């Protein structure tokens, strides 16, 4: 785990209101794995804000976000050279290992966040990658995607499959998913063994506050920031995990 | 000039005046950026005799200059603490006090007996101030007789330092402070979190599943400085100041207001290096003003 003052390198738009912010964080870039996150200290909000690492480019890491509140608005308004306090890499990612021949990546809205890294790791392990990405409408689809096959799904049918990303996805030996918690609950129904990245409120991001409780099917809670944020879909008690956070980032 | 940063507080000699507050440092095992040289001591996450699951999410919510938490004292219970954490603490170069909790006076006593003498347990911080449990917790901290009864039950079962963590949710903290001093406490910690509430205007209901939570962070600092000061004026035993300390200046306010040492909680979430920064800042202040030790810092402590 590293704590760095990371200079912003660049920001690029990938959908209206949705942007990728890259920052120079060499130690994190060198060690982060798909599904892990960074906790960013931004002027404005009191607590840090967690973001999945979207891509790694040399000594820089990228995060993708929309403005949903003070912290995200602040981050999107930063200029190259401005400093962000960057803590990470945090949590347990998808932990991909060689074996499966195909991987299906399912993302909804901002759930694209961990997928480019996951696609790269899966491909490096010899898997054929299918990425299924869903959003409300064609405008809201992220313009970047990786994989041998990319399938789009929109709620209003304005592009690709008319319906949810879960419904549009083919089966695969390995399924990885990220999106609103209620979408992940649907993933758990269809593929209990899928690996899903969940979202909770976080206090510390490092395992000491117990604020990020994820209710488990087996009973009790563990920590999204430490044992998670990636879980076996069937392990989570979806009925007890809040599906509507006050900030509807991935909805 | 070298400044002596060590302090004597409630039966312990600490190498520095800054401790990690209960519930914000876990069991001290997952703090990779910790600079141990700066840590005077640590209070472990509040524990009950038996394992507890804690409250359902959402457990935390950000508020102006602070946060509410309702963790519900999730923890593995005394046996697991003794097995998994105490052996590690025994090898560390700073003392670890255990924050103890119970639903009854008898349960506090039993927990103390279980932990007393376990290598690695340097002392006890009695939590009579947790706002997030249905039974026990703050109830004991609200009533001088109950507070004294719990303190006595713990005192009788150990010769290790006994500190009592006070709740701010009282009309006169001096009454509780004097009651636990008379019951044998070696030091007081002032204060725990304030009870608060935050409403989600989309769902039209409280944001926390527990409805209410404990408010911490800079939002409570002036309230906490005042309460720690009031407690310090009321007793002869040392007081550790807690509440909203983010920087060295904040810690110095508590010290000047009459505290012997301080605990830092929420700041660690924002800045994982907060404790070291605060320790170094206190040292720099003492140097600048020509004081040779923490004890030399002037205290504003008029006696009633
Ligand atoms: C592991 C993980 C990975 C994530 N990855 C991404 C990502 O890649 N891209 C992305 O856009 N988002 C991601 N998120 C969500 C992101 O962290 C939130 O969008 C962000 O915290 C919102 O901050 P804000 O200041 O913009 O909004 P706020 O103004 O803070 O949000 C609105 C409301 O949410 C509450 N709130 C926000 N954060 C917290 C908190 N930590 N604790 C308690 N209450 C809070 C506020 O009180 C407010 O009422 C991720 C979350 C997690 C847990
Ligand atoms: C997430 C969290 C968990 C806490 N858990 C405990 C606990 O188990 N026992 C206890 O006595 N105090 C607990 N506290 C209170 C802190 O130790 C401290 O008294 C309070 O947060 C005020 O200090 P601060 O503003 O520096 O955080 C907790 C605080 C937070 C934020
Ligand atoms: S956010 Fe603090 S334990 Fe996970």
Image (spheres, coloured by chain):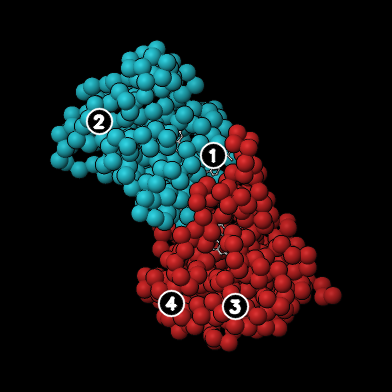
Q: Chain of mark 3?
A: B
| Disc number lying in front (2 or 4) | 2
Q: CA distance from mark 2 to mark 4?
A: 49 Å
Q: Is mark 4 within 8 Å of ligand 2?
A: no
Foreground: B160 or A10?
B160
Q: Which residue is mark 3?
A: B105
Q: CA distance from mark 1 to mark 3?
A: 45 Å
Name the residue rendered at 28%, 41% in the picture.
Answer: A192
Left or right placement of residue A195 versus residue A37 in this view: left
| Disc number lying in front (3 or 4) | 3
Residue A227's disc is none
Residue A158 at least partly seen: yes
Left or right placement of residue B216 versus residue A161 in this view: right
Element type at mark 1: loop
Element type at mark 4: loop
Name the residue rendered at 38%, 37% in the picture.
Answer: A185
Q: Chain of mark 1?
A: A
Q: Which residue is mark 2?
A: A104
Q: CA distance from mark 2 to mark 3?
A: 56 Å
Picture coordinates of residue B196 (x, y %)? 67, 52
The reply to whether discs 1 and 3 touch (Cβ–Cβ < 8 Å) is no
Q: Give the chain ID for the cyan colour.
A: A
The reply to whether discs 3 and 4 touch (Cβ–Cβ < 8 Å) is no
| Disc number lying in front (1 or 3) | 3
**Do circles 2 and 3 both sit on a common chain?**
no
Residue B120's disc is 4
Q: CA distance from mark 3 to mark 4?
A: 24 Å
């Amino acid at each position: 785990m590293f704590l760095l003052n990371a200079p912003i390198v660049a920001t690029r738009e990938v959908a209206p209101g949705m942007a990728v912010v890259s920052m120079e964080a060499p130690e994190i870039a060198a060690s982060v794995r798909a599904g892990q996150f960074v906790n960013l200290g931004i002027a404005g909000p009191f607590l840090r804000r967690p973001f999945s690492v979207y891509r790694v480019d040399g000594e820089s890491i990228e995060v993708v976000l929309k403005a949903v509140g003070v912290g995200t608005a602040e981050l999107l308004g930063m200029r190259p050279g401005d400093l962000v306090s960057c803590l990470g890499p945090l949590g347990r990612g998808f932990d991909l290992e060689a074996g499966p021949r195909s991987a299906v990546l399912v993302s909804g809205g901002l759930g694209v966040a961990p997928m480019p890294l996951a696609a790269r790791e899966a491909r490096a392990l010899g898997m054929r990658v299918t990425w299924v990405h869903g959003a409300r409408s064609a405008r809201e689809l992220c313009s970047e995607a990786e994989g041998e096959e990319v399938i789009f799904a929109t709620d209003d049918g304005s592009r690709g499959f008319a319906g949810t990303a879960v419904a549009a996805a083919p089966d695969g030996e390995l399924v990885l998913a990220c999106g609103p918690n209620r979408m992940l609950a649907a993933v758990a129904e269809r593929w209990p063994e899928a690996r899903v990245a969940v979202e909770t409120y976080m206090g510390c991001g490092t395992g000491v506050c117990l604020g990020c409780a994820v209710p488990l099917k087996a009973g009790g809670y563990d920590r999204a920031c430490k044992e998670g944020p990636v879980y076996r879909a069937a392990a989570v008690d979806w009925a007890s995990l809040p599906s509507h956070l006050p900030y509807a980032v991935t909805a | 000039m070298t400044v002596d940063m060590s302090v004597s507080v409630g039966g312990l000699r600490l190498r520095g005046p800054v401790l990690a507050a209960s519930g914000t440092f876990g069991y001290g095992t997952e703090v990779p950026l910790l600079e141990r040289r700066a840590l005077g001591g640590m209070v472990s996450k509040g524990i009950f005799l038996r394992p507890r699951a804690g409250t359902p999410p959402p457990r935390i919510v950000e508020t102006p200059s602070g946060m509410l938490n309702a963790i519900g004292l999730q923890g593995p219970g005394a046996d697991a603490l003794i097995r998994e954490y105490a052996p590690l603490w025994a090898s560390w170069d700073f003392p670890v006090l255990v924050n103890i909790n119970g639903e009854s006076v008898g349960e506090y006593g039993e927990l103390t007996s279980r932990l007393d003498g376990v290598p690695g347990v340097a002392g006890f911080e009695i939590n009579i101030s947790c706002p997030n449990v249905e039974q026990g917790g703050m109830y004991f901290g609200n009533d001088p007789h109950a507070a004294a009864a719990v303190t006595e039950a713990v005192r009788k079962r150990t010769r290790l330092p006994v500190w009592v963590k006070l709740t701010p949710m009282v009309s006169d903290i001096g009454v509780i402070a004097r009651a636990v001093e008379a019951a044998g406490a070696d030091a007081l910690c002032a204060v725990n979190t304030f009870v608060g509430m935050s409403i989600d205007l989309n769902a039209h209901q409280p944001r926390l599943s527990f409805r209410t939570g404990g408010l911490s962070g800079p939002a409570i600092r002036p309230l906490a400085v005042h309460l720690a000061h009031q407690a310090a004026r009321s007793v002869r035993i040392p007081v550790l100041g807690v509440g909203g300390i983010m920087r060295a200046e904040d810690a110095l306010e508590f010290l000047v207001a009459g505290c012997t040492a301080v605990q830092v909680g929420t700041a660690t979430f924002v800045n994982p290096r907060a404790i070291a920064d605060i320790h170094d800042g206190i040292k720099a202040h003492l140097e600048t003003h020509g004081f040779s030790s923490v004890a030399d810092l002037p205290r504003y402590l008029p006696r009633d």
